[in-house]
Amino acid sequence: MSRKRTLILGSAASVLVLAVVGAGIAYLMLSGGDDLRYKSQSALLKALPANAAAELRTRGVTLQSPLKCKDLPGWTKKKLRASCTGTTTDRRDVQVLGSGEERTSKSYYTILVGGHPIVENAPCLGADCRGKDG
């Protein structure tokens, strides 16, 4: 193989590698790192009461006592589902629904107070909305 041909093939290979790396970086930036914040049902159950209470506080709603959370039927390792219940200081019922799906990397949260939606299908609650790094 001639020297000129080797240089051309080497340059073409370099351009191809740079294009592949650039496409990978672009994909990661555009996907926004949409990994699920909570990788397990137990992690969701642990975080949901505090984050929902914080979200309610920002909306002027105070709880009589901490929220109690449980698994919702149908949850799996890939489809997280949880529900929390409680009461406000003015005795209105509170229901929090949280879900996450590994396949889509999406999470949704809904909070009902006195049967009325305060938060509907939000991607985050409380401190989670400030970003993964705080």
Image (spheres, rainbow, N blue to C red):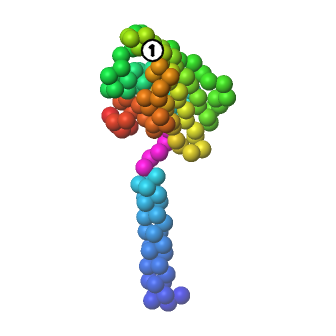
Structural crowding at the residue carrying mark 1, measured as other residues with C-alpha within 10 Å and reported as few (<14), some (14–19) or many (≥20): some
Image height of 6 relative to 81, above or below: below
Residue 40 location (% of width, % of height): 56, 29
Residue 10 appears in the rendering = no
User: Which quadrant holds the C terminus?
Assistant: top left
The magenta stretch is: 32-36
Whether 83 is among the magenta residues is no
Amino acid residing under circle 1: Arg
Residue occupying the point 37% across, 35% down: 129
Q: Mark 1 points at which residue?
A: 92
Residue 13 location (% of width, % of height): 48, 75
Whether 33 is among the magenta residues is yes
Element carrying mark 1: loop
Image height of 35 relative to 28, above or below: above
Closer to us: 42 or 48: 48
- Quarter of the image where one finds residue 14: bottom left
Residue 119 location (% of width, % of height): 44, 31
The residue at the far right in this view is 74
Q: In this figure, what is the number of numbered marks?
A: 1
Secondary structure mainly formed by the magenta segment: loop
